[in-house]
Amino acid sequence: MNKSLVLTLLAVLTLASCKAPPPPVTDDTLVTSEVNGVKLVHRHAVAAPGEFTPVNQSFRALYGASIMTTPDYSGKVVRYLETGKTFEVLGRVEHSWLAIADEPQGTLIGYVPPKAGVESSRYDATLRSDRPRPRRSKQVCVDVGGASKACRTNDTATWILD
């Protein structure tokens, strides 16, 4: 009886000292990467950039761009920007793409093309300058005798007599 008690205690102590295996790594597991001296926290599915230049500014989306897992179009789409909505740019990475987050100094959620957004302070001016300008239609006029003339605009084939 004494030996069975000792063996049971020995088995319990041996199993108690074992560590549980680490949880499996999934796409949603948060990892930390250091690039150019800057620590970035991101999901495992989002690739760490090869180079990084900090920006840390609020931008607004010019169109509904895809947020990608890599700073190019070969990655997977994480989600989409909403036109006019604010997002945080953590920095510029390869190919001038923007590394973005939902909040200042937040978790890197992905990358967008460089023309997908503009600094929040320049958003209204950018939209105004991007609007198409109305074109002036040219008139073609010919003399039809005396003080009279016939005119037509380039966009129609209708002649009007003056």
Image: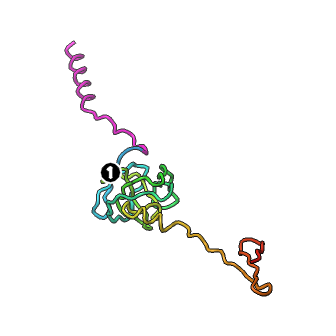
Instruction: Tell me the crowding category of disc 1: few under 14, some 14 to 19, or many 20 or more residues within 10 angstroms, Cα based.
Output: some
Image quarter where the N terminus lies is: top left
**Residue type marked 1:** Gly
21 falls in the magenta region: yes
Counting from the top left corner in percent of width and height, residue 88 is at 36, 55
- Outermost right residue: 145
Magenta segment = 1-27
Please tell me which residue is depicted at 77% across the width and 75% down the height of the picture: 159
Q: Secondary structure at mark 1?
A: loop
Counting from the top left corner in percent of width and height, residue 154 is at 71, 75
Residue designated by label 1: 106
Q: 145 or 42, which lies in front?
A: 145
| Image quadrant assignment for residue 21 | top left
Q: Please give left or right for residue 111 compared with residue 158 in the image.
A: left
| Image quadrant assignment for residue 112 | bottom left
Please tell me which residue is depicted at 50% across the width and 57% down the height of the picture: 63
